[in-house]
Image (cartoon, rainbow, N blue to C red):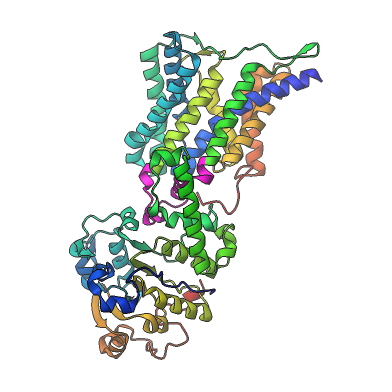
Amino acid sequence: MGPLAQPTPTAGSTAIDRTAAPDTDRAPSASLEMTGITVAFGGVIALSEVSLVVEPGQVHGLIGPNGAGKTTLFNVACGIVRPTAGEMTWRGQPLRRLKPHQLAGLGIARTLQGVGLFPGMTVLENVMIGAHRHARAGFGSALFALPRSDRDERELRARAMTALSDLGAQQHAGRYPGGLPYPVQKRVALARALVSAPDLLLLDEPASGLAEDEMHDLGELIRTLSGRMSVLLVEHHMDLVMRVCDRITVLDSGRQIAAGTPAEVQADPAVTEAYLGDEVTAEEDAAGTTPTDGGRHHG
Amino acid sequence: MQYFVNVTLTGLTEGMVYSAFALALVLIWRSTRIVNFAQGSMAAATTFIALALIQAGQSYWVALIVALLSGLLLGAIIERVVIRPVEGGPELNAVIVTLGLFVAIQAAIAIVFGSAFQSFPTPFGLEGFQVGDNRIALTPNSVWVIAAVLVTMALLVVLFRFTRIGLAMRASAFGQEVARLLGVRVGRMLTLGWALAAVVGSLAGLLIAGGEFVYPAYMDSLIVFGFVAAVLGGLDSPIGAIVGGLILGLALSYVSGYVERGSALVNVAALVILMVVLLVRPGGLFASSTARRA
C-alpha cells in the first residue's frame, strides 16, 4: 500500500492533545454505545442482549465464528436492521429509527464485505459519492449547474483525489472498478469511506482477499486512523485483529461470550471453546487464516 | 440520388424522436429496473396540455415550456404515488402497474380533452429547404426537432457527468443500498429520474405531434418504435438508445421509401430489425459485460 493516510492536523485532534484537554475536543463524546441489543428474525434469535462501547479514537474488534451475529450487529449499527430490543447511542444521543442514509450525516462511514463499488462509475466518481454529505449546493443549483455548484464540484473532486492519494490509488482515478485488481478495489472502497472524514468507521472484513503484505499495510493504516476516528472492525484474520484492536468483543451464536483487551480475550477459556474443533488458537494463527474462514481470504 | 438523400433526411429526423423516446425509457430502466409502458400516455397528456394552451391563444413556446414542466411534475408524482409502493416487489407488478397507467392516462385524456383528431401546430415551416433547383426533405421544423433533441441530450450528459446530483443519480442506479449507506437520498434520486424521463418523453411527444393530428392514442406507434430503439441499444445504455433510435428511423424510412407498399410494412420491419439484432446480440448493440447485472 502506498503512502498511508496521516492524521489531519486539526486543533486538538491528536491523541496527546485529547488526553490533555478532553473537554475541548468533540471526539470524546464520539463513542458508540450499544446496550442490550437483541435481534429476532421471526423466531430465530440472531442477537441476544449484546452490549458494547466503541470508545473515541479506539479500534474495537468484533470477532466470533461464522453465524455468530457479527454482521447482524453491524447492520444494526447502520440502521439496516432494526433491533427488537436494546438501545444505541452515538455522541451521547440516542439513535432511534436510524436509517442508512442518515449515517453519513452522523459522521459514520461503513465499508462492505467485498467492495460494493459502483461498476459504471470511475474510481474517482465512486470516491466522490463518499463525500456526498459535504454537499452544500442545494438541489436546484446543482441541477442547473450554477456557479456555486460548479465550485463545490471541483472541491469535491479535489477531496476525492486526496483520499485516493492517501491510499496510494490516485493513479487509478480514471479507471472503472471492474478492471482493477481486487486489493486495489478494496483500497478504493476504503478511500470512499474515509473521504467523508467520519468519526466512526465501520469496517466489514477489510482484509478478506488481501495478501499477507497488504494485510500488514492495512493494519498499519487502521492504527493511523485510530488517532482521528473510532473504528469498529469485523474481521476473521485473528493476527490482524489482535494487532490493531484496543478492545475486542467476542460473539458466539448471537451472545456475547467475552470482551476485553486482546490479551484478555485470548486468555479467556470461553473464546477457545467457541473456536473449539480446530486446534488453532489465535496466537498460533500468524499465517492469517482462522478456523472459520478456510480459504475464503483469497476470494 | 436526391430521393436517397430525402429518404435519409426523413429517417434521421424521425430517428431523433425515437431516440428521445427511447432515452426516456432507458433513464427509468437504469434507475428503477422498470419498463415504463405509460411513457407514451404521459407524453400524450402533456402534449394535450400544450395544445389546450395554444388553442387558448398562447404561443407555441409558452405551451412547450408548460408541457415540459407538467411532464416533470407528472413523472415525479407517478413515481412517488403509484410506482414507489410496488418498487422492490416482484418485477412483474411494476410492469402491470405501468400498463394500467398507460390505459388510465389515455382514458383521462379522452375525458378531459375529447377523443377527436385535432391538428397540432409547428413552430417552424414544413416546406423543405431549397437546394439549387430542388427542394430537399429537410424542413425548418425538422431542424428544430433535431436541435431540440440534441440540446436535451447534451444537457443530460452535463447533468449526469458533471454535477453532483447526476453523480448521486448514477450511484443510486448502480447500487441503491450502497448509495444509501453513503448518504445519498436514493428515493429522491428515483423521483428525479422519473421526472427527467417524463420531460424527455414529453419532448418526444410534442415533437412528433408537430404538423400532425393528435388524439389520445396518437403516441401508440411511437411507443413501439421507442421500445424497439431502446432494446436495440441494450436498454441500459443512453448512447445505445440514441444510436438505436437513429438506426431504426433510417431503416424504417428506407423500407417505406424503397419497398413497394413499404409504408404498410413499417411496423413489421421494426419487429424484424428487433428480432435480427437480438438474435445476433441478445444484450442489444451496446450491452457491455461490465455493465450491471439485470
Asked whether, in this view, residue B256 is left or right of residue A45, the answer is right
Give the magenta part as a residue range. B159-188
Q: Considering the image in quadrants, where does the N terminus of chain B appear? A: top right
Would you say residue B285 is visible in this rendering? yes
> Residue B287, percent across and down?
60, 46
Q: Position of residue B27 (x, y in %)?
A: 49, 39
Overall secondary structure of the magenta section: helix
Residue A50 vs residue A123, the one in the foreground:
A123
Q: Quadrant of residue A252?
A: bottom left
For residue B89, say whether it is visible. no
Identify whether A199 is placed above or below B28.
below
Q: Nearer the viewer, residue B70 or B39?
A: B70
In the rendered image, residue B164 lying in the magenta stretch gets the answer yes
Residue B70, given in percent of the width and then of the height, sits at 40, 25
Where residue B166 appears, x then y in whole percent?
Answer: 47, 44
Residue at x 21% of width, y 57% of height: A96
Give the left or right position of residue B225, taking residue B64 as reference: right
A285 vs A83: above or below? below
